[in-house]
Image (cartoon, helix red, strand yellow):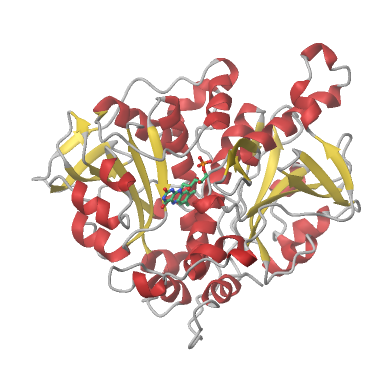
């Protein structure tokens, strides 16, 4: 394997690490004068109201297309719709959404591209979460441009609707500066998790396309690529339309490994990195017709002397008739702001891991047994256990295939976890914290620098499943995107080669 430690992905990761020695110097006060707006406005375009479909009774539906509108309306609401309103101390309204977002800044925008079909006029739409409506801002047929930008992905021959997620970089960079790119991709992963599950509730099977020609995609949506960029393309297979079949190609495509950079100033690193991970052309032979099955990583830390505990359960979480409890859970999910410090039970931890890592156990309930991720095989999971009854305190590696916890450190880490999470009490009071990590050297060698996006989106996607499982079990949950990177490895015994990507705290809500 080639050494990729001089790649821009490595450089970005190293430069945006938090460390106790440098964090004070790095933290700047927020520029309240230039606070970003969380909603995008369009001066032109037809508004398509989606709210009315949520309120209708079944008997109100007279046209077959009404059901399609209802499904689309519910899919978008459960993916990124507004689900709560808070009043700030200054009396302003702050709207929270179905998908969590670091700092509540919501850098992602959601678009739809429709090709000519019977019910949704072709063209480009932006989802306006503030009014739960669509703005149809471009009405010409653009589907063939989408196909070109996605290297003629065969799934686009089948479907007639695709969700596109973008990021408005400044929304998140306003607060998190260059490190914001990590959170932008994690946020997008949470959103993708919702799209996957809300898709299943509404009979859509979303496919993930991570490899596309960025410039063409941005042009297609009339974006200024310096300010806003496409992050994922998600064709929606309509499971109620038997004429649509499922050809599969790789979800993740490689970009080049970019080593030719020097002296990128602070504040410009995020944008430089994003541009450097774009794809213009593919090397010959990269596109294979068959999508290789994501193989979950196996047999790490399987030492004969380490304590191994089965995390299998025969009781999957029940999501109700036609997944109605899943829909309710998505709509009521909130990030927990404080834990009591009380314990989870080991059974609860097993259920959380089962829903997150064992989707095959949920097929009977109508969920996809093998939902798309970009490159799940490169993600590892470690769990710091501070309070789980029936499980010794310490740090464990979770082997997803064997469904086994393998203990790598024995200790109560509460004090250290408080420090590692930048002094946030959520870290100290959680019963367990799930850490997603990846070997960046291996990952960049496989997918080029663009893998940084894929890894963070996959970690966010897993995080969203953990979030929903926790809420369903009446547990508390919150993601944490700010942590002392290298110290996490040192304290918990996670190998140095594993870059820590994301933390999900789980506990008893206060
Ligand atoms: C990627 C990511 C990182 C986050 N990091 C933190 C964090 O470090 N500390 C925290 O208290 N909450 C964190 N959160 C939770 C957000 O603050 C929360 O999602 C946001 O305020 C919206 O509220 P909601 O999740 O209840 O909808 C994070 C969420 C995400 C998705």
Q: Is residue 77 above or below residue 247?
A: above
Which residue of the protein is positioned furthest toward the bottom in this rendering?
262
Q: Residue 84, how many percent across, how many down?
A: 60, 35
Residue appearing at x 44%, y 43% in the figure: 463
Q: Residue 441, how many percent across, how many down?
A: 37, 69
Which residue of the protein is positioned furthest toward the left in this rendering?
305
Q: Nearer the viewer, residue 390 or 143?
A: 390
Q: Is residue 69 left or right of residue 103?
A: right
Which residue of the protein is positioned furthest toward the front in this rendering?
90
Q: Is residue 439 left or right of residue 210?
A: left
Residue appearing at x 29%, y 34% in the figure: 340
Q: Is residue 309 left or right of residue 30?
A: left
Q: Quadrant of the N terminus?
A: bottom left
Q: Residue 50, how many percent across, how many down?
A: 79, 33
Q: Quadrant of the C terminus?
A: top left
Q: Is residue 304 left or right of residue 167?
A: left
């Amino acid at each position: 394997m080639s050494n990729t430690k001089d790649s821009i992905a490595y450089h970005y990761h190293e430069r945006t690490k938090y460390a106790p020695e440098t964090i004070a110097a790095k933290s700047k006060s927020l520029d309240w004068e230039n606070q970003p707006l969380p909603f995008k406005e369009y001066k032109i375009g037809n508004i398509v109201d989606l709210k009315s479909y949520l309120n209708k009774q079944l008997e109100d539906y007279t046209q077959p297309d009404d059901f399609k509108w209802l499904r689309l309306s519910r899919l978008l609401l459960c993916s990124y719709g507004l689900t709560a309103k808070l009043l700030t101390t200054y009396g302003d309204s702050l709207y929270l959404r179905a998908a969590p977002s670091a700092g509540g800044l919501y850098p992602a925008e959601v678009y739809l591209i429709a090709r000519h079909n019977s019910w949704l006029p072709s063209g480009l739409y932006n989802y306006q979460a503030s009014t739960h409506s669509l703005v149809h801002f471009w009405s010409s047929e653009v589907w063939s441009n989408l196909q070109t930008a996605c290297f003629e992905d065969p799934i686009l021959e089948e479907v007639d609707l695709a969700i596109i997620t973008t990021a408005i970089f400044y929304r998140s960079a306003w607060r998190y500066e260059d490190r914001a790119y990590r959170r932008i991709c994690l946020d997008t992963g949470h959103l993708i998790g919702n799209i996957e599950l809300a898709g299943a509730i509404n009979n859509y099977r979303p496919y993930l396309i991570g490899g596309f020609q960025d410039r063409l995609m941005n042009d297609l949506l009339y974006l200024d690529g310096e300010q806003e960029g496409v992050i994922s393309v998600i064709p929606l297979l309509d499971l109620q339309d038997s004429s649509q079949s499922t050809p599969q190609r790789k979800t993740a495509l490689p970009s080049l490994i970019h080593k030719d950079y020097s002296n990128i100033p602070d504040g410009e690193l995020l944008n430089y990195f994003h541009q450097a991970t774009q794809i213009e052309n593919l090397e010959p032979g990269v596109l294979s017709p068959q999508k290789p099955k994501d193989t979950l990583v196996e047999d790490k830390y399987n030492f004969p002397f380490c304590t191994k505990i089965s995390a299998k359960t025969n009781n999957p979480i029940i999501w109700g008739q036609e997944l109605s409890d899943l829909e309710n859970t998505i709509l009521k999910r909130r990030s927990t702001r404080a834990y009591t410090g009380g314990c989870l039970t080991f059974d609860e931890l097993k259920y959380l891991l089962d829903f997150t890592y064992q989707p095959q156990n949920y097929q009977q309930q109508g969920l996809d047994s093998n939902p798309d991720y970009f490159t799940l095989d490169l993600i590892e999971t470690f769990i710091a256990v501070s309070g789980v009854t029936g499980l010794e305190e310490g740090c464990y590696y979770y082997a997803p295939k064997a469904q086994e916890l393998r203990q790598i450190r024995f200790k109560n880490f509460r004090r250290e976890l408080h420090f590692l999470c930048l002094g946030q009490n959520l870290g100290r009071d959680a019963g367990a914290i799930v850490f997603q990590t990846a070997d960046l050297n291996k990952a960049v060698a496989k997918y080029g620098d663009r893998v940084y996006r894929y890894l963070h989106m996959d970690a966010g996607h897993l995080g969203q499943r953990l979030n929903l499982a926790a809420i369903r079990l009446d547990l508390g949950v919150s993601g944490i995107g700010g942590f002392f990177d290298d110290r996490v490895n040192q304290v918990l015994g996670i190998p140095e080669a594993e870059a820590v990507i994301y933390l999900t705290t789980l506990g008893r809500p206060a």
